[in-house]
Amino acid sequence: MTDPRQRHRGREWVFPTALLLIAAGIWWSVLQLSSVIFGPGYGHVLAHAVRAVSIAVAVLLVLAVLLRLHPAARGYGLIPDRRSLRHLLAGAAGYAVPMAGVGAVVLALGLAQIDLPDGVPAAACQLLAVLVLVLLYEAIPEELIFRGYLFGFLADRVPIWATVVIQALAFCAFGFLIGAARTPDRLLLFLLMSLSIGVIRAISGSVYAAIGFHMLFQTATQPLLGHHWTAFTLDDPDLWFTDLAFGLGPMLLGPLLVFLLYRTAARRARR
């Protein structure tokens, strides 16, 4: 006879599997509907705003239902508390500091150049718009799913290193399903980013540190690498800034910086 405990453990996997499939379905459906209404591609800011709000609301509703169906998920740290802002800022620093440091070296060596053709006020306004859209469209919904619910579910069942690896592979599968990572270079980017954020989640113990890192990553890269925001231009012919300042630098050094921040905070707390 089958052990009832094994059947129960098997049924538990229905929740994260269903969540990932529902999340992929939400993103894919919103993108398809947006293409019908606003036209294919990124579109204008209004189109992106509609997508961002639609996805954020849908994902938060799905997670709210899941918390009722799977009460154990209430212990995964999805709901913010008084420490969430500190975690968010620590994760943001994990990206911003290495990116700024490596980027400054690249710019000082003349390997790349950044210009603000419309001036500082226009750049600041666009940056703020990107930040809001990133939080709604990517950082909050994706992190609550992958480094929030899925990470918490896995951490209760497998070693932490396996949790980091499995959630990263799940994030790559998600990117493939919604069409955001269909090429080897995009899949590699998704893998490196999700591994780095997964390590930060493990170090901090909070999904909000993961949100902070993801938020700064997308907010920094979209205005400079996309063609939809005109207040920033990046001249990077050999991709030194793109590969090092946006990519490898923060993804390798970010978890180390976050570790040092939390270790320093722990030492101060013990005094």
Image (cartoon, rainbow, N blue to C red):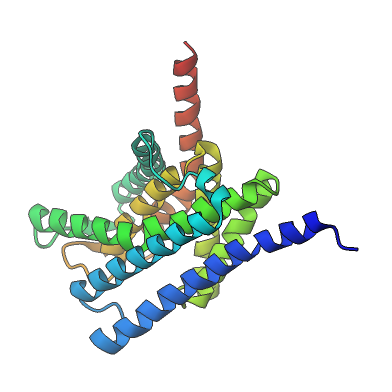
Q: Is 234 located above or below residue 76 in the figure?
A: below
Q: Nearer the viewer, residue 241 or 81?
A: 81
Q: Is residue 157 visible?
A: yes
For the image, the number of numbered tags is: 0
Task: Check the image and report above or below for 179 versus 137.
Answer: below
Q: Is residue 242 in sight in this rendering? A: no
The answer to which quarter of the image holds residue 188 is: bottom right
* 231 vs 4, nearest the viewer: 4
Residue extending farthest to the right is 1
Q: Position of residue 247 (x, y in %)?
A: 44, 55
Quarter of the image with the N terminus in it: bottom right
At horizontal 52% and vertical 38% (from top left) the residue drawn is 205
Q: Between residues 59 and 61, which one lies in front from this camera angle?
A: 61
Residue 208: quarter of image: top left
| Image spot of residue 207 (x, y percent) | 46, 46
**Residue visible at 35% across and 58% down?**
218
Q: Position of residue 189 (x, y in %)?
A: 50, 63
Question: Quick check: 113 left or right of 120?
Answer: right
Quadrant in which residue 70 is drawn = bottom right
In screen coordinates, is 55 left or right of 250?
left
Q: Position of residue 85 (x, y in %)?
A: 34, 38
Which of the two residues, 173 or 74, is positioned nearer the viewer here?
Answer: 74
